[in-house]
Image (spheres, rainbow, N blue to C red):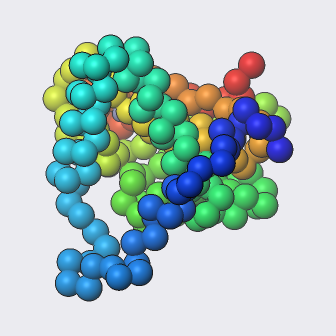
Amino acid sequence: MKENVFLDSPKEYSLEDYMNHTVNGRGNLGQEVPIEVYRLLEYSLREELEERFGKECQVEIMRCAGRRAGIFFARNLLDVTLPLQEFVAQLQAKTAELKIGVIRIEKLDEDTGKIVLTVSEDADCSGLPLLGETVCNYDEGFIAGIMSAYTEKEYRAVEIDCWATGDRVCRFLVEVKE
Ligand SMILES: [Zn+2]
């Protein structure tokens, strides 16, 4: 396992600890929060990061955070031993089940590992106004992190279409980083 792919470092608490929400849980309120709450967190964080560190740094932080989440997701919620086609099918099922979005595969090259996929009903951006730029940097990292954890190669995902650029799906070009 290559160190640079997984960003693992010794920490007092890990992402795993914060995910432990069922113990002493939410007996009355349950496991879900509305999309407004998710977006409030995401976009307030983006604004704060941009004000403090500038746009470029904000984008990079969101992407890197998404990457951490993607690695966690793949390791804890997916079976990374499956062959590629089955792995992708499992990913589609899990992201729909968890209401992250609906993934469709447009191209999948088994030799190069290059994938073009769309996410519709995306939790991060569906319904956003035309902002003139793609906004799903967290998703870019998330998808890249999942594929990196699966292949143990460093992946990159670039969003080429988004609700915020006038499309009705987010489209990602996903490939091994050179
Ligand atoms: Zn998007």
Q: Quadrant of ligand 1?
A: top left
- Looking at the image, which is closer to me, 17 or 112? 17
Q: Is residue 130 left or right of residue 111?
A: left
The furthest residue to the front? 12
Locate residue 31, reporting x and y percent.
31, 73
Name the residue at 42% across, 32% down: 62
Question: In the current view of this chain or complex, which residue is farthest to the bottom?
Answer: 27
Q: Residue at x 51, y 48 (%)?
A: 69
Q: The N terminus lies in which quarter of the figure?
A: top right
Compared to 135, does 21 lie above or below? below
Pinpoint residue 10: horizontal percent, then vertical percent.
Answer: 66, 48
Would residue 83 be found to the left or right of residue 138 on screen? right
Q: Is residue 2 above or below residue 131?
A: below
In which quarter of the view is residue 144 placed? top right
Q: Quadrant of the C terminus?
A: top right
Image quadrant assignment for residue 27: bottom left
How far from the left and from the top, in percent, is residue 58?
37, 23
Tell me if I can see residue 100 in this picture.
yes
Give the percent coordinates (x, y) of residue 106: 56, 38
